[in-house]
Amino acid sequence: MIKTVLQEVNFDQEKTVIPLARLAELPPRTRVTSALLDVKTIYHEEGIEAFARGQEVLTRFPDATRIIVPSHLQIPELSEDSGRIKDWISTKRTTLVLGVKKTLKCAPYERSCDFVAPSQSNGCAMSCAYCYVARRKGFANPVTVFVNIEQICATISKHAESQGMKLTPTQADEDDHVYELGTNSDCAADALISNNLKDMVSLFRRVPNAKGTFATKYVNRTLLDYDPQRKTRIRFSLMPQKISRRVDIRTSPISARIDAINDFVGAGWEVNVNFAPVIVYDGWLEDYAELFEEVEAKLNPKSKAQMSAEIAFLTHNADLHEINLQWHPKGEELLWRPDLQETKISGTGGENLRYRLSIKRGFVEQFTTLLQEKMPWCRIRYAF
C-alpha cells in the first residue's frame, strides 16, 4: 500500500519550462518590497530559466539586475570582499542568489528530525547574530534559492518510500519519519521569494509515512493557506523579547510569534516551540518565567494539547565572533562569554564554544524545571 501511494507522488526530475506567456496568466503575487526584502540584484547560474522555479522567481523580481555566475558557491564579490561586511543587512535585503542543488540526499539526524532533507535554500533574509550559516558564507550571507525543487521533492519521496512504515518511535515523532527542511535557512521567510516550501508541504500531505519540519523566527501568514493537514511541523523559535531585540535581527517580534500559534494550529499545522538558543545572562530565568507565562496565557487548549518544546543552549564560534564585531558588536556582549564558555568540537569537526559543561548541566536543569512549572502541559522533546 505504501509503495503504491508513494509512487503517485514521484516527480519528473527533468527540467520543466513554463512559457513566459503562461507565466503572465498565473495569479499575480504582491511584489516583495519591505524592510525584509527588496531584491535589486540576482546572481544566478547559467540556464536557471530552464527550471520552472527559476522562471517564477525571476518574474517575481522583474526589475532586478541579473548577473550570471559559474556557481552559487563561487561569487567572489560576496564571499571574498571583506568590505561587504559593513553592508551586511543591506546585502541581505537587496541580493538574491539562484542555483541548482547538486547534492541530493537525506542524511540521518537525531534531534528535531529523523533525517535532514536536501536544502531548498541556503542563507536567510533575517540576520540572527548567532547563526552558524553566516560563518560559512564569508563576508555576505544573502538567501540562495535552489530552483530544482522537483528533484529535491523526488529525493525526499523516494527516501521515505525506502524507509517503509515507522515501527519504532523516535525522539522526533512516534508515527512518522520526520524530515528537517530548514537547517540552513528560514523556510517561512523563503516563502516570500518562492513556492519551494509550499511544494514540500504539498508533498508531505501525500506521503503516508513522513512529515516535514522547520523552525522559524518569521510570522508569514500566507502559510495559513497551505493546508498541511498536520503533516508539516512548524517550530516557532522563542526567547525573551529584550534579548531577541539584540540578537534576532530583522525577525518577527516574540509576541507576534506566540500570537500566531493558535492560528497555525487551526489551519492544520502541527506547531511546536523552539527555545533556542537559550542565552545565559543576569536575570535570564526571571525573563524566561515571563515568557512562559505569556505562552501559557495565550495558547488555547487545542494548541497546548499538541505542543512539544525543543531546548538548545547557545553555541558560538570565534570566527563568527570576529564577523559580528564588524557589523553588530552589541550582540556579542551577550554571545561572547569566555568566563562561561569552553571549546567544543562539533559533529562536523568545527571548533565552537558552548557553556562549560560543569555549569551547563545546572542551567539545563533550572530551565526545564521552570518550564515544567509554568507550562506543565508542554512536552520536552530534548534539552541540551
Image: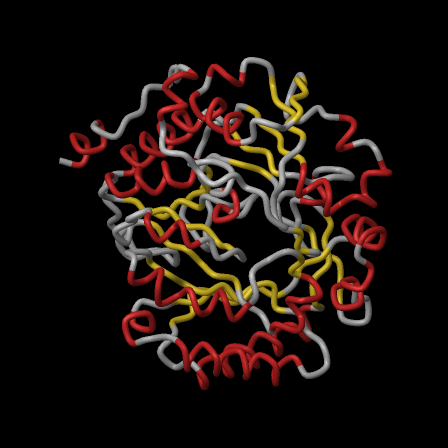
Residue 222 location in percent, x, y?
Answer: 40, 50
Q: Looking at the rendering, in which quadrant would you find the C terminus?
A: bottom right
Total marks shown come to 0
Residue 3 location in percent, x, y?
Answer: 19, 31
- Residue 173 lies, with reference to residue 296, above or below; the image says above
Q: Is residue 254 left or right of residue 71?
A: left
Residue at the image point whose x is 53% and y is 36% from the top: 121
Residue at the image point whose x is 45% and y is 43% from the top: 181
Q: Nearer the viewer, residue 29 or 70?
A: 29
Residue at the image point whose x is 50% and y is 17% from the top: 49
Which of the 4 image quarters holds residue 53?
Answer: top left
Q: In this view, does 28 lie to the left or right of 1?
A: right
- Residue 155 lies, with reference to residue 212, above or below; the image says above
Residue 29 location in percent, x, y?
Answer: 44, 38
Residue 155 location in percent, x, y?
Answer: 38, 29
Does the image show residue 15?
no
Does the image show residue 376?
yes
Q: Is residue 302 left or right of residue 119?
A: left
- Residue 222 lies, with reference to residue 252, above or below; the image says above
Q: Looking at the rendering, in which quadrant would you find the N terminus?
A: top left
Render colour scheme? secondary structure
Q: Nearer the viewer, residue 13 or 125?
A: 125
Which of the 4 image quarters holds residue 283?
Answer: bottom right
Residue at the image point whose x is 61% and y is 81% from the top: 287
